[in-house]
Structure formats: C-alpha cells, structure tokens
Amino acid sequence: MSTPSTVMIAGVGPGLGAALARRFAQAGHPTALGARSKTALTEITSQVRQAGGLALAVPYDVTNDQAVAAAIGQVQSQLGPITTFIYNAGNQARGGVQDLSPDAFTAAWQVGPYGAFLHAKQLLPKMAAQGNGVMLFTGATSSVHAPAKNPAFASAKFGLRGLAMSLMREWGPKGVHVAHVLVDGVILTPRVQSEVGDQPDYLRTEDIAEAYYQLALQPPSAWTFELDLRPFTDDYFEN
C-alpha cells in the first residue's frame, strides 16, 4: 500500500472493526465499513469522519451472495478499486452440541467461512488483475484450539483458517497477500471494558488494529501468512 488506496472492512462493530476503520482511515485510506446493522454502522462511520477520515457506510448481509456483490460494487464506484479487504465478521454461537439448534450451527458457518468465501470470490480476481492486493481474515483462539461446548464457533473458525490458507497458496503467486490473524485472548471492546474495567491483560483494539495495518504493509519478499496476537500476560511459553 505505497499510496492511499481503498480499504473495505466486513463485520464492523464498536470493537475491533471500528478500530480497524479508524487506523486505516487515519493513514489516508478511503475506508468502507460493512455490517448488517445500519444504525450502529452509521454511528461508527460518523466517528471516523469526525476524526478526519474518508469513510463510507455499507450496510449489507455478508452471507448473501447478491448483497456481497452489490456492496463491493458500491465501494468500488464510490471509493475506487479495493486494494485491502478485511473479513472481521463472526458469529458467537455458544453451547454444546445438545444446546445448539441446527440453524444456530449453520449460522456460525454462514457468517464465518461461507461469508469470507463470497467476498474472496468477488475480490481476488480483481486484486490479481490490479497486480496487488491484501486480504486479511480475523481468527480467534478457537481457530486452533477448540474448547468443550463450542462446536459451532470453533469449527467455523477452523474452517475460516483453512479457507485462508488455501487462498494464500492459490493467490499469493498472483500478487495477493492473504493472511490470517489469530487473536488469541479477550478483546477489550467497549462492552467488555464497561463490564470488567480497564484490564491490562486483555487485547486492546487499537493495538490489534496497528498489527493489521503493519501486516498490510509487508513487501512480497517477506509476507506473513499467520500473525498470532496475544497479551503479554499469556502463559503460552510455560505450557
């Protein structure tokens, strides 16, 4: 991203999605914010604009192929070719196999790997034709470690990671940097902060967003596929 180019973020909420939008817009990138909730999206977009960023709110359903195509078309017509895309959507379906309905399980997969697939199908050929592009997927602890009573969310995140890896191998040689960001820990969103306070061992949204931004700047000779983010208090190296 040597020059300010268009960024599109799917799955923008008041936590990480909003922080990502602020970081890329702050760097001068026209930034499109996508989510299902028009009300919340309008508020976040307004905040980005008030901070001096060029932002576009695009409310749509990330699991509907026609809606995805229309949203991407709108962004391209209003902001220009999309050079960086971030898939941050997710469905926090919780409960064991006996607790989940088939619809709840399916919804987790629709918002997870299926929604990501729909965007990739539209954007990757365009990015390859442009000669460059960045596609980042938001993962979680459950992308590699599935706890008990979490089959829907964990399997969907496993699936998203597999999708990202396959896309990386196919489209990396064509000039598109595909990467998976494993956010391993609790994110200090506004809601979480209101409940537990300013916890030093939670991941701060602005710090995560900075990691995404630096990942998008990497040169082709040293691309990262998976970036593992965890708070400094994590006991990863002790286990």
Image: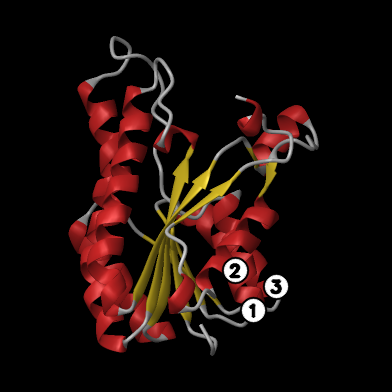
Of marks 1 and 3, the one in the foreground: 1
Q: Is residue 76 left or right of residue 8?
A: left
Q: Position of residue 72 (x, y in %)?
A: 31, 72
Foreground pick, 145 / 82: 145
| The label number, if any, that marks residue 214 in the structure image | 2
Q: Report which residue position mark 3 lands on.
A: 50
Q: Amino acid at mark 3?
A: Gln
Q: Amino acid at mark 2?
A: Gln
Q: Quadrant of residue 58?
A: bottom left
Q: Position of residue 54 (x, y in %)?
A: 58, 79
Residue drawn where x is 70% and y is 37% of the image: 202
The disc, 1 or 2, on the residue closer to the chain's N-terminal end is: 1
Q: Is residue 135 depicted above or below 81 in this figure?
A: above
Q: CA distance from mark 1 to mark 2?
A: 11 Å
Q: CA distance from mark 3 to mark 2?
A: 24 Å
Of marks 3 and 2, the one in the foreground: 2
Q: Report which residue position mark 1 lands on.
A: 27
The kind of secondary structure element at disc 2 is helix
The kind of secondary structure element at disc 1 is loop
Are the residues at dot 1 and dot 2 in contact (C-beta closer than 8 Å)? Answer: no
Residue 123 shows in this picture: no
Q: Is residue 204 depicted above or below 200 in this figure?
A: below
Q: Position of residue 13 (x, y in %)?
A: 53, 50
Q: Is residue 1 left or right of residue 71?
A: right
Residue drawn where x is 79% and y is 33% of the image: 197
The disc, 3 or 2, on the residue closer to the chain's N-terminal end is: 3
Foreground pick, 12 / 226: 226
